[in-house]
Image: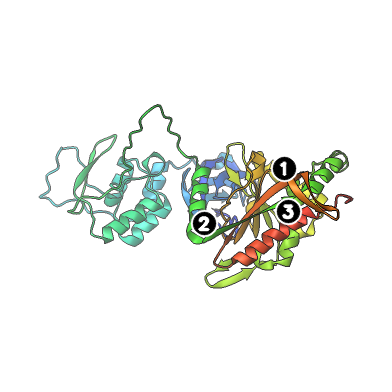
Amino acid sequence: MAIVDLIMPKLGESIMEATVLKWHKQPGDTVKMDETVLEIATDKVDSEVPSTAEGVIEEILFNVNDVVPIGTPIARIRTGAESGASPAPVPATAVMEEAVTAIMPVVQPPTSNFQPPTPNLQPPTSVALAKEGNRFYSPLVLNIAASEGVSMSELEYIPGTGNEGRVTKKDILQYVQEKKNGKTTSTGLRVTGHSEVSVAKETAPLTTHPSPLTSYSGNVEIIEMDRMRKLIADHMVRSKHTSPHVTSFTEADVTNLVQWREKVKKDFEKREGTKITFTPIFIEAIVRCIKKFPLINCSLDGDRIIVKKDINIGMATALPSGNLIVPVIKNADQFNLVGLSKQVNGLADAARNGKLKADDTQGGTFTMTNVGTFGSLMGTPIINQPQVAILAVGAIKKRPVVVETPAGDSIAIRHMMYLSMSYDHRIVDGSLGATFLTAVARELENFNGEREV
């Protein structure tokens, strides 16, 4: 019989932590090899974590909504035992008491001169606080508290912004910073469901930053952001803070492309079993231009330019919830148009049905977003970090335009489309950005209307 740690798996090169969404197993439950134990979420995608051993769940180390660093043990599995022989699951309060006792020093009871307000008050030990306060602290929070010299009595008075008022990593780090700045807490009482527990505290009052109560006039509805929307918002803000954005615009006459697709789409779907949309055609043109201008396919690491030899194209995809996700076509330059169509449709279907794997959103080197899908003529997209450029294609509209012919200029009805590209001005100058964007437009304009698929 042995105890095996279930480790938070590595989910991509840029992902350092994940959030626990749901536990499928509890202490005392049997688990088979590769059976799903819990669901987790990152800023890229939701995923399932399978068991790495067969046995009985001995202990769960994190609760739902806890943020866990990659490589951290999240559960313990006892191997070599039948489920019927397993002991009763350890209550969460007992697990908490053991964790607190092992990590935190016990707060000494007050001196004999201390007069408790009521005869039922108990000395404030760390275990008593965790139990009586009925407040859960994740191992990460406890480790930070131990390393920063924050006692359990202080933890009890830190306002929590997590689920059910739990103290998060952000809360404990903010408290530590305030403490270093001289903002400490005072003696007080924490009222629990069982009794009042006296807490020895510092002399100055705790400075908190509760969200201000805002009153809204008129008939309004307040909607809390869901987890993914919060992650998207944070990602967008970080991108604007990281990269000085410049956006260039051009337009393309895609009449030949539109007419060719209309001509072949029925036979293509019948023969290949998948539809041909404009997206794989756009991606094919982008890939050809990246090979001509490789500096577009790079990232920055300090003052070093990392030119990517792999061409992995991300395609922004809208989810039924209205949120956005960017699945990635790996080595897009190695697919023909049929292969690109199958890759695009497969990833889009997986995104809409919640079947994307963690690897499906990793490793992108350039991103394309089709704002024309929703009727927009053009857009100013935000760079998908750590990439340095993102291209947006607008809606295809019929317009009267001047056409140059050997017989002279004439006005004709053509299928026109605007393209825009935002790029990181630290590495992509206006000349390179505009030249690349124009090259993509010329690729689409010169599409061979007699092409065989």
Rendered residue at 41%/46% (across/down): 95
Residue flagged by tag 2: what amino acid is it?
A: Ser
Circle 2 residue: 239
Rendered residue at 82%/43% (across/down): 259
Circle 2: element type: helix
Circle 3: element type: helix
Rendered residue at 73%/43% (across/down): 400
Marks 2 and 1, how far apart in space? Answer: 35 Å
Relative side of 228 to 401, left or right = left
Q: Are marks 2 and 3 in contact (CB under 8 Å)?
A: no
Circle 1 residue: 399
Q: Nearer the viewer, residue 137 or 170?
A: 170
Give the number of the mark in front: 2 or 1: 1
Circle 1: element type: strand
Relative side of 77 to 268, left or right = left
Marks 2 and 3, how far apart in space? Answer: 23 Å
Q: Nearer the viewer, residue 275 or 58?
A: 275
Q: Position of residue 232 (x, y in %)?
A: 53, 48
Circle 3 residue: 283
Residue 192 to residue 358: above or below = above
Residue flagged by tag 3: what amino acid is it?
A: Ile
